[in-house]
Image (cartoon, rainbow, N blue to C red):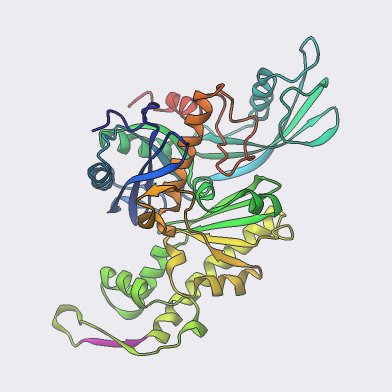
Amino acid sequence: MKEDAMDNDNNIIVGLDIGTTKVCAVVAGTDEHGRVNILGVGRATSEGMMRGVVTHIDRTIRSISAAVDEARAQSGVDIKSVIVGIAGDHIQSFQSRGVIGISGADHEVTQADIDRLIEDTKRVALPTDRKIIHVIPQEFIIDGQDGVYDPLGMSGVRMEANVHIITGLVSAAQNIYKCVQRAGLEVADMVLEPLASSYAVLDDEEKEVGIALLDVGGGTTDLAVFEERTIRHTAVIGIAGKKVTDDIRKGLGILGEQAEKLKKEHGFAYIPAVVDNDPIILPGVGGRQPIEIDKRLLATIIQPRMEEIFEIAALEIKRSGYSKHLSAGVVLTGGGALIKGTSELAREVLGMPVKIGIPSGFAGGLVREIQNPVYSTAVGLVYHGLKYQERSSSAKVNATADAGQSKFKIPLLGKSGVLDKMRSWFDEL
């Protein structure tokens, strides 16, 4: 076995997506040509999470261990550290602005100036139970000249920045951190899940012209709006695939497992998409007579909840102020995107082009296994780690300076990433 899942020599990165309904672990590495190969995939049923937040420590630890053990066995990598995602309806975001004077001898912008400016944008009043997770520069302004994305080396006397700040509850981050540690792993970094998903399914051109990413998971639906190469708005909606399953369970009076299977195998999110309306026979509960339903009836249960998700997403997109700028439309990903007819319903509700986002950009390995919207977040976490590793080993470039300019942009907090800031939150662990 390889010694460490984050060993720079082996270029191995492990992404861990701890969701409400499933835990996914993806092991990847780069070869001598910089190509990404998927080495192992692990997946386990998630127990102990609700809407992206830990509700039962021991069950979450067991789910993490099961997924990581499967990925470890498949890849032959001794996994010791992971990059983990964070989501949940406790996530909030807002815009901030900072300004500094450029004090160097030649009034040339240095990395220290950029770091100082980013620190200035973080001077905002936050409740004691909330901390900053990401600070993402949107544009820099030098001596009144806006539209600057990489100010390093430019000349001026005054530099401003508009940034997007994402915050989360300290307790939610602590509990994820605690579960990963107790599963025998280290947290190498913690990344907002819709950002991670965007690395896996969006490309530069889409981010340039304007696009919204909608990740329909089990417990939450995550939204990220991009335009002019950078993120403009994020939101987490506390309604997702598990609510659809609950509606089926209650509407038909069946078990949760039956409802989930029914949704995956026979479910339609858009009633006009149902062509074959053959009846489905379900075994009765507790020795009762079998239940017979048709696909159209099932679709009448699923469609209203999926409509609600897309209507809330439409309101969030409108609230972002970028609803008229999304020339590339919407990319749907996550397990909820697998329900048949979802893209048609989303196109009707949102009123813009919609496509299903599938992780891409791999040279080899278990490529077919992860070409599924379910793995978008886990794969995105891997890309985050690979890109940060590349930056660290070559010239030690601070990711804050050029966040958003490559497909796998890394919105890190300061020089060492969000984890350095988070470590002070976990003194009691």
Dominant SS in magenta: strand
Q: Is 219 placed above or below 295 here?
A: above
**Residue 169 seen from this side:** no
Instruction: State the image quarter where residue 382 is shown.
Output: top left
Residue 173: x %, y % from top left: 42, 37
Q: Quadrant of the C terminus?
A: top left
Residue extending farthest to the right is 144
Front-lying residue, 395 or 186:
395
Front-lying residue, 340 or 96:
340
Count of all numbered marks drawn on residues in the image? 0
Q: Quadrant of the N terminus?
A: top left
Instruction: State the image quarter where residue 289 is shown.
Output: bottom left
Q: Is residue 57 left or right of residue 348?
A: left
Front-lying residue, 16 or 389:
389
| Residue located at (55% from left, 42% from top) | 408
| Residue located at (32% from left, 37% from top) | 180
Residue 420: x %, y % from top left: 47, 25
| Magenta span of residues | 290-294
Residue extending farthest to the front is 33
Residue extending farthest to the left is 287
| Residue located at (55% from left, 32% from top) | 412
Residue 115: x %, y % from top left: 64, 23
**Residue 394 seen from this side:** yes
Q: Is 132 placed above or below 102 here?
A: below
Residue 239: x %, y % from top left: 47, 61
Q: Is residue 159 left or right of residue 71?
A: right
Q: Is residue 291 magenta?
A: yes
Instruction: State the image quarter where residue 340 is shown.
Output: bottom left
Q: Is residue 21 magenta?
A: no
Q: Is residue 404 left or right of residue 36?
A: right
